[in-house]
Amino acid sequence: MNKPKKAKYAMPLMVVFILVCNGLLHTNFAFTQTTQDPFEKIITFKAQDEPLRQVLETLGKKYDLNFTYNADDPSFDTKVNLNIHGEKTSDILEAILKQTGHDHKIVGNHLVVLQKPASQEKKRNSADHNSKTPTNRSEENTINQITSQKAEEKIASHDQEVSFTAQNHVRDTIFITDTIIKVETQVLRDTVVVERFVTRNNNIPRPVRIMQEVLSIDLNQTERWAFSFHYTHMMYYRQISNPGLPANEFERISDSEGISFRNFGLGAEMRYNTGNLTLTSGLSFHSFSNRFSYQEIITSGGFNEIDTLDAFYTLMQSDTIWSYITDTAYIPLESEETFYDRMNHKGFMELSIGGIYNILNTNQYSLFVKGGFHAGIPVLLSGNTINNTSNFPAAPLEKENVNSILWAYRGGAGIRFKLSEWNDIYAETYYKRYIGDVITNYPVEQRINGFGLQIGIIYYL
C-alpha cells in the first residue's frame, strides 16, 4: 500500500524540480549575457585629432572591448574628433566609424571594423573618385564587394556559433583573411632612328681627311664677316741708346722715366674670315701713363772777371810797347736746382690693319697667331719731357714736342673659344713697338714698347 503512494507523488515532484532548474538556468544565462555585453555599457568618451587605430586601442583597454580590423589599412590613420557623454558604447563606436567612413558588425564580444560598401564610399569621397578612370572604379567596387561578401560570410558563420559559445563561456577568436593582388604592367617602347649622311670629297688629301673625320678639326672654314671688341692691358717700357753723352748726363736722362703698368687699350675691329686666314681692320685708343722724375741744375759764376781801365804805349827805337791798367773782380758761384716728380699721360688714336692665321681648329677652340701695323696721332698729352738744349731743361709735353704721326707694329698668339654659332671669345698675348722717336728734340734715342694681354669677344654676321 505504501509503494503506490510514493509513485503517486514522484511525478509532480520531478516536474517541479525541472521547472526550478530551468528557471535558474535562464536567469543565470540572462545575468551572464548582461554582465558580458560591454557594447551596451553607458560611457563617456572624448578624442581630439587622434588616429582611428589609437582610439580603438584606447577603448579596448579602458572598457575591455575586442576589435578586429586590418592594421595595414592606411584609412585607420584618419583623425577622429569626438566628445560624447552618457551614451552606449555601440552608439559611440558607430559615431566614431561614421567620421572615418567605416562600417562595423558585432559578433559576440567582438566588433569587426569593415570598409563601407562601394556605393556608400563613392558618395562620401566623390571628389577623389571623380579623378579616377572608369576601369579603376569598377576594379575598386569589385574588390569592396568581394571583401564585404567574405566578411559577411565569416560573420554569419560565427553568428551560428555565438549562442553555443556564450552558454559555455568560451572566448571566440575571429580571423578575417582577405588577400587582394593587383598587378599592372605598362611597357612603353619607342624607336628613334637618326640618319646622318656624310659627304666625302675625294680631292681632299688623306691626312687632312683624317683630321676632319677622326680629330673633328675643320680646316676649311666658310667665308663670313665678323665684328669684335677688345681690351688690352700692357706694360710700358722705353728702349734708349746713348749718342755720346757723358755717363752722368745719360744716367740722369734714362732714369727720368721708368717701367709702368698703368697702360691700356680699347678698340674694335672688322674681320673677314676666309679659310684659316682672317683679315682685320680697326680703330683703337691706347693710353700710356708713367712717372716722370727729373732733376734740373742751373749754375752761374765761380770765376774772376777782369776789366781794362786804361791803356798807354811807349816807343823804343822801332818797337811800340803797350801797357794796360786793369781791374779784377770775382764773380761768385750761383746754383739753381729744380726737381720734377709727376705722372705723364700720353694717348694715341690709331688705325690698324692686320691678319690672323689659325694654326689649329677644333669644334670648340682654335689656336692662332696674329700681326699687324698701326698708324696713330696724339690726342692726349699731359706732363713734362726733356728738351735737347743747354743743360737739358724740362719742357711741357705738348703736340709740338711729339711726332704728328706715330707708326707701330704688333704681334701675338692666342686661343679662341666657341660660345655659339654667332659668338666667340678669345685671349692673346700682345706685343707692340713704336717705330722711331715719339718725342722730337729729345737728348737720346728712345722707342716705346708695350707687352701685355688682350681679351675680346667676336660677333659673327
Image: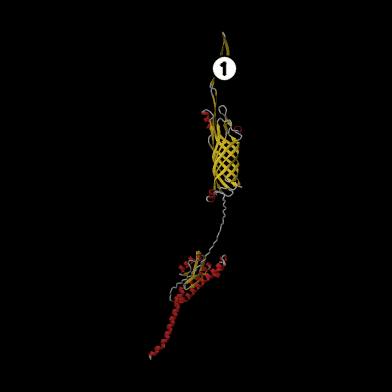
| 162 in relation to 292, above or below | below
Quarter-of-image position of residue 126: bottom right
How is this picture coloured? secondary structure
Q: Position of residue 185 (x, y in %)?
A: 52, 65
Of residues 396 and 446, the one drawn nearer to the viewer in this rendering: 446
Q: Secondary structure at mark 1?
A: strand
- Looking at the rendering, in which quadrant would you find the N terminus? bottom left
Viewer-proximal residue among 273 and 175: 273
**Residue located beneath label 1 in the image:** 307
- The image position of residue 350, as x and y in percent, is 60, 38
Amino acid, disc 1: Asp
Seen in the picture, residue 390 relative to 68 is either above or below; the reply is: above
Q: Residue 419 location in percent, x, y? A: 56, 49
Residue 164 visible in this rendered orientation of the protein: yes
Q: Residue furthest bottom?
A: 1
Q: Please determine whether, in this image, residue 13 is positioned above or below residue 179.
A: below
163 in relation to 295, above or below = below
Q: Quadrant of residue 441?
A: top right
**Numbered-mark total:** 1
Residue count near mark 1 (Cα–Cα under 10 Å), binned few <14, some 14–19, many ≥20: few
| Residue at horizontal 43 percent and vertical 83 percent from the top | 18
Residue extending furthest toward the left = 2
